[in-house]
Image: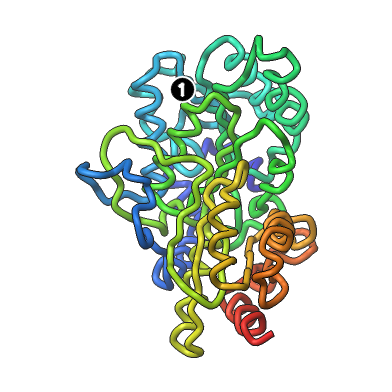
């Protein structure tokens, strides 16, 4: 229904704001309850050093990254459903008027065609940036991503590649999205050799990581937590910069337990860490993984070797979620240092619900209880 409405209405900004009225208050509550702008150390890996900054939302940071990519490379193209109108979330607003409809253009409603077209462009040396309107609808393109894009270099013995392809897709809970506008499908793609999978949690990271994906010579899936589009606001360096891929960020230092997350869930972990610190005196180290494939196992292992405990949290269902991979790796590599079994606090093993969304999601309350249980094991 929501998708059909996007075709009929074109998702002009006023129409989207009206449709978004149900989740914007929830987004504001999320922002007020602990959306972090950054953590200890430099999350940008020195990329923003000495640069002027400006306050941007995550949405505006993505828009700026796309603008820079198009400006720096005349063989870069942005396309997808409704992108020339600015997109349903306004991430591509103003790009078509600046760079022309031959470089920022709408496509038919066919995700398989969008990604297949992007793979063809990338194989010809172009820099396609394809948008899947909602990550929930990426599955018609699954074969193109898994069997074509990710394997193109390997199967040709390095003679050809589709490494210039970047696929953007809004993901995650939004307040009222229900079954088909709330899913987090990252674990489907972290199983695919040859792919890069990234999920940002802040505006500065979103801009730098997106530019890094666009410029890296590997096909990339860039998942954007849509609840953070307007609720996450922070200082973003001006101009071009990239954030290192496969490099986690230690958001909060601690000594009792390591909490690992990405995207919107990172902020839930930060809130839970603050709660158990104030009420229980538990010191949590919080890590934003940022890149899920290839992920920064060394950072997580070093932290767990120090704290002796691990908790991983994500919105996707528990079973076979990416948290299981992290827990397995830590169990094998940090076994002698573990004081308790690794814990996972995740979405339920059900389809994403509508009216029961708050019961489905791994809230700060659930995380805090799991932290206490793990520390007191």
Above or below 49: residue 212: above
Above or below 118: residue 275: below
Residue at point 52% right, 68% down? 268
Q: Position of residue 169 (x, y in %)?
A: 58, 40
Q: Position of residue 140 (x, y in %)?
A: 75, 33
Secondary structure beneath dot 1 equals strand
Q: Position of residue 108 (x, y in %)?
A: 64, 24
> Which of the pair 22/309 is nearer the observer?
309
Whether residue 134 is visible to the viewer of this picture, yes or no, is: no
Residue at point 43% right, 69% down? 253
Q: Position of residue 356 (x, y in %)?
A: 70, 71
Q: Quadrant of residue 358?
A: bottom right
User: Mark 1 highlights which residue?
Assistant: 104
Residue at point 32% right, 44% down? 46
Check the image and name the residue furthest to the bottom.
279
Whether residue 341 sits left or right of residue 200 in the image: it is right
Whether residue 246 is visible to the viewer of this picture, yes or no, is: yes
Quadrant including the C terminus:
bottom right
Whether residue 113 sits left or right of residue 272 in the image: it is right
Check the image and name the residue furthest to the front.
336
């Amino acid at each position: 229904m929501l998708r059909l409405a996007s075709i009929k209405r074109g998702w002009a900004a006023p129409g989207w704001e009206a449709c978004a009225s149900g989740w914007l208050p929830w987004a504001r509550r999320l922002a007020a309850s602990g959306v972090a702008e950054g953590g200890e150390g430099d999350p940008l890996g020195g990329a923003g050093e000495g640069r002027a900054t400006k306050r941007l939302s995550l949405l505006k940071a993505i828009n700026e990254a796309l603008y820079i990519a198009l400006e720096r490379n005349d063989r870069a193209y942005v396309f997808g459903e409704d992108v020339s109108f600015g997109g349903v979330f306004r991430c591509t607003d103003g790009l078509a008027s600046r760079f022309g409809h031959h470089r920022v253009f709408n496509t038919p409603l066919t995700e398989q065609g969008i990604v297949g077209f992007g793979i063809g462009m990338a194989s010809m040396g172009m820099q396609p940036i394809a948008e899947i309107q909602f990550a929930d609808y990426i599955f018609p393109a699954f074969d193109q991503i898994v069997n074509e894009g990710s394997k193109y270099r390997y199967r040709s013995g390095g003679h050809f590649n589709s490494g210039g392809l970047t696929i953007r897709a809004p993901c995650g809970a939004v307040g009222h999205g229900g079954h088909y506008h709330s899913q987090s499908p990252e674990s489907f793609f972290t199983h695919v050799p040859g792919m890069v999978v990234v999920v940002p949690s802040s505006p500065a990271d979103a801009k730098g990581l997106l530019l890094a994906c666009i410029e890296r010579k590997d096909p990339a899936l860039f998942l954007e937590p849509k609840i953070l589009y307007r609720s996450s606001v922070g200082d973003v360096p001006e101009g071009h910069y990239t954030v290192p891929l496969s490099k986690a960020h230690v958001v909060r230092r601690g000594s009792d337990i390591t909490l690992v997350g990405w995207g919107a869930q990172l902020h839930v972990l930060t809130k839970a860490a603050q709660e158990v610190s104030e009420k229980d005196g538990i010191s949590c180290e919080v890590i934003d993984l940022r890149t899920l494939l290839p992920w920064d196992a060394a950072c997580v292992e070093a932290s767990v070797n120090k704290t002796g405990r691990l908790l991983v949290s994500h919105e996707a269902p528990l079973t076979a979620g990416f948290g299981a991979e992290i827990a397995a790796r830590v169990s094998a590599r940090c076994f002698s240092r573990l004081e308790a079994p690794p814990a996972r606090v995740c979405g339920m093993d059900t389809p994403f619900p509508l009216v029961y969304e708050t019961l489905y999601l791994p809230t700060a309350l659930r995380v805090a209880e799991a932290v206490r249980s793990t520390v007191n094991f």
